[in-house]
Image (spheres, helix red, strand yellow):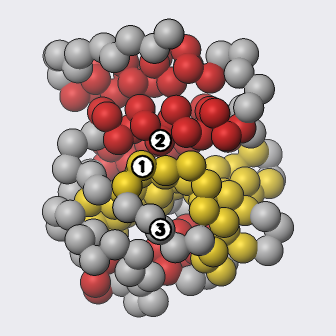
Amino acid sequence: MFQAMPYDGTRSERFEAVLSQLAALIDGEPSVIANLANASALLKFSMPDTNWTGFYLFDGKELVLGPFQGLPACIRIPLGRGVCGTSAAERRTLVVDDVHAFPGHIACDAASNSEIVVPLIKGDQLLGVLDIDSPLKHRFDDEERRFLERFAAMIAAVL
């Protein structure tokens, strides 16, 4: 059974605690859906000021909505479109301080003002993206980007 750990200490220590919790949650669990559902819940629980946290999975053609925490979302996103599709096509993390200034932004939740998208890659294969939205502009910084890239790599390893 999962027991939420309090996040005392520095921000870096909190990120390390979340990574340890993720490792415990996915250890030995073969279900992709279960792992992604728990991972999205863990991030939503541990990251304040976010309104959507979840995954889109690449089906060989486009990104398809996977497990998430938040309001109902766009179901399919073409590669190269919006923040998620651009991150997936370019296979790089995108931190967008103001989504309304991002060309081609797909507004799934009108409350979102900033976003970070981390591609899920295993070897050379694109598996999907981790997507997190915030109602605050400039919500995501470089330390959080590094943490989420580690988180995404752990998830990609079990997909």
Q: Amino acid at mark 3?
A: Ala
Residue at the (44%, 65%) spot, across then down:
72
Farthest residue toward the bottom?
103
- Which of labels 2 and 3 is toward the front? 3
Q: Is residue 97 left or right of residue 132?
A: left
Residue 24, x across and y down, in percent: 55, 14
- Height in image: 60 above or below 15? below
| Quarter assignment of residue 70 | bottom left
Between 81 and 35, the one lying in front of the other is: 35
When the figure is inspected, residue 140 is found, relative to residue 42, above or below; the finding is below
Q: Give the mark toward the camera: 1 or 2.
A: 1
Residue 15: tell me if it is visible. Answer: yes
The residue shown at (61%, 76%) is 77
**How far apart are labels 1 and 3 at the CA level?**
10 Å
Name the residue tied to disc 1. 69
Res. 153 visible in picture: no
Percent x, y for residue 86? 56, 75
Q: Earlier in the sequence, mark 2 or mark 3?
A: 2
Q: Which residue is the site of mark 3?
A: 73
